Amino acid sequence: MTRFLHPYPPGVFITGLGHDVTLFVSRYLDIRSLGAMRTGGRTGDRYVAAVLSRRLRELVRDFVDDAEGHFIEELHQTNSVVGSLAAAHFLHPLDCRAPSILAIFAPEKQWFHVVAYLVHVEQCHVKIELQQLNARRSKGERVAILTSSRGKINVVQSRWASPLEPIMNCWQSALYAYVTPTSFCDPYHELTRRKRGLINPRKVFPGLGIPTGQVARLISKWSRRGWDLVQQAEDWGGSPGCGTPEARYCAGTQRYFGDKFCLTGVIAPVEARDVGRLPYNALEEYTVLWWRGGETCGPTCHSGDTEISSAVRVYPTNVLRMGTLDQFDYITDMFVYPIALLQIDQ
């Protein structure tokens, strides 16, 4: 199956550069630079679609044998997404290294289908871990750890129809991005392209401001690669405070996948964007809202609280597009949950 593999347009895209040189350069461009190329008309749109569709295949080819269509189709049909370091590398190939683990996030009811595909088609060995979220809840978060001769894949089960909610348990903001066979979303792209990241407050001991042991090791590893990782954006200098563009990084700012701060887009060119459209798409039906939590950005922030708890909530997408969150608090109460620890050593 090749319906998600888009062809290169005929002719030369960049005057003065041959096709081979243009192809080599485009392999290393981040998603923002490719977006600029896409504004070059129909040819630019087709060229970027070809680059992105091949980049996704090259990414998964390191982990599965049948990357030329069937595995991509499996992700599409189950509304599953590629996340964590794999998505960050797809969007920022020079700033984020290639992953040693392919992290897949699947909706609750489609999780088993993805796992079964990898076991029966890719001949992976599977080990399933159940992580209890709350002693009062019978529902846990399952992670299937699949290994084969090609590598390791973690398939994380969401507790809802949206596959996105477990992504927010990743340890720093660069890993909150996701990619599908048809689209992508990067909530903190401006930080990532500067090799900056905000540490997830859930990975810090409450009241102490000290990262957990595993996260401390990851901070050290990423710092050696040139990354600057902090707990609050103010640590990079200045105190923007709420009400400024930088408030998108505030502990109490409500964010969601697809909001105005995200870099969101599609992979296909304009003429092929209806190809493979699903009758029901959980990624279009639901999204995830969060606020980071942790220390606030100043005394005028969040009614004067110096520290607030983080939260992640699943919303119908149309509710958020109305821009009237306060009217839908009852929906929030239905979906709030604590996130389990996700062991992905990246």
Image (cartoon, rainbow, N blue to C red):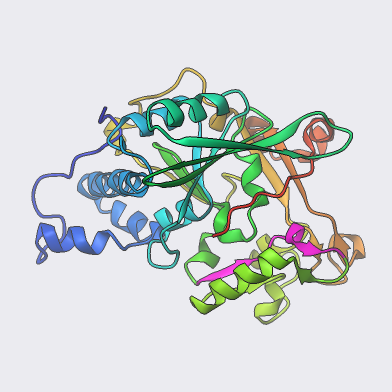
**Does the stretch in magenta take in 205?**
yes
Residue 143 horizontal/vertical position (percent): 62, 39
Residue 207 vertical position relative to residue 140 in the rendered view, above or below: below
- Which residue is the extreme one toward the top? 279
Regarding residue 126, the answer to whether it shows in the image is yes
Left or right of 307, for residue 254? left
Query: In the displayed structure, would residue 120 be above or below residue 106?
Result: above
Choose between 250 and 208: the one closer to the eye: 208
The residue under the point 87% across, 37% down is 135
Residue 256 visible: no
The quadrant the N terminus occupies is top left
Left-right relation of 237 to 85: right
Q: Which residues are magenta?
A: 195-206
Task: Pinpoint residue 22: horizontal percent, then vertical percent.
Answer: 18, 61
Count of marks overlaid on the render: 0
Q: Between residues 135 and 189, which one lies in front from this camera angle?
A: 135
Does the segment drawn in magenta span residue 321?
no
Q: Is residue 181 above or below residue 74?
A: below
Q: Residue at x 75, y 70 (%)?
A: 241
Instruction: Work out which quarter of the rendered image holds the C terminus and state it.
Output: bottom right
Q: Quadrant of residue 222?
A: bottom right
Q: Residue at x 81, y 28 (%)?
A: 138
Where, by quadrant of the figure, is residue 181 drawn? top left
Residue 96, position as x, y percentages in the image: 45, 64
**Picture residue at 80% right of the left edge, 38% below the top:** 336
Query: Which of the two residues, 86 or 268, is positioned nearer the viewer here?
Result: 86
Whether residue 275 sits left or right of residue 194 in the image: it is left
